[in-house]
């Protein structure tokens, strides 16, 4: 189990969207609704729930830093007037 930041991987992102298994399942209509992972594969659903709560993407931190930078710039700009 990974704790901390998730590292983006373009190859895995593309592979997940273009797999043969996914294409067949979607074309036949055998797709469970959102939130049904506990029924279809409980072990994977539990793993994903823990993983998503204990790790965060690098973009979240980047956006937080940009937001703080924007607030700082705005404060400096207002104080100069």
Image: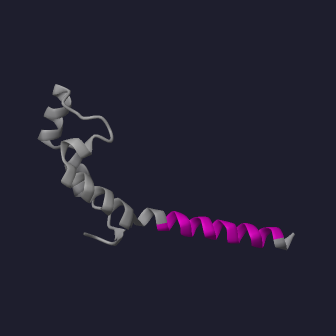
Residue drawn at x 12%, y 40% as measured from the top left: 21
Residue 56 location in percent, x, y? 40, 65
What colouring style does the render use? one colour
Q: Main secondary structure of the magenta part?
A: helix
Quick check: is 70 in the magenta stretch? yes
Q: Is residue 10 visible?
A: no
Residue drawn at x 17%, y 39% as measured from the top left: 22
Q: In the image, 55: left or right of 66?
A: left
Q: Which residues are magenta?
A: 61-78
Residue 35 location in percent, x, y? 32, 42
Q: Nearer the viewer, residue 13 or 47?
A: 47
Furthest toward the right, the residue is: 81
Tag count:
0
Residue 79 location in percent, x, y? 83, 72
Q: Is residue 19 above or below residue 61?
A: above
Q: Is residue 81 visible?
A: yes
Q: Is residue 25 above or below residue 2?
A: above
Which quarter of the figure is the C terminus placed in?
Answer: bottom right
Quick check: is 72 in the magenta stretch? yes
Residue drawn at x 68%, y 67% as measured from the top left: 71
Q: Is residue 43 above or below residue 69?
A: above
Q: In the image, 67: left or right of 41?
A: right
Which quarter of the figure is the N terminus placed in?
Answer: bottom left
Residue drawn at x 18%, y 28% as measured from the top left: 27
Furthest toward the top, the residue is: 28
């Amino acid at each position: 189990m990974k704790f901390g930041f998730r590292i983006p991987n373009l190859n895995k992102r593309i592979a997940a969207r273009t797999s043969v298994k996914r294409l067949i399942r979607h074309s036949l209509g055998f797709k469970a609704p959102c939130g049904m992972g506990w029924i279809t594969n409980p072990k994977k659903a539990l793993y994903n729930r823990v993983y998503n709560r204990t790790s965060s993407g690098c973009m979240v931190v980047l956006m937080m830093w940009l937001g703080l930078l924007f607030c700082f710039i705005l404060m400096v700009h207002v104080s100069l007037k």
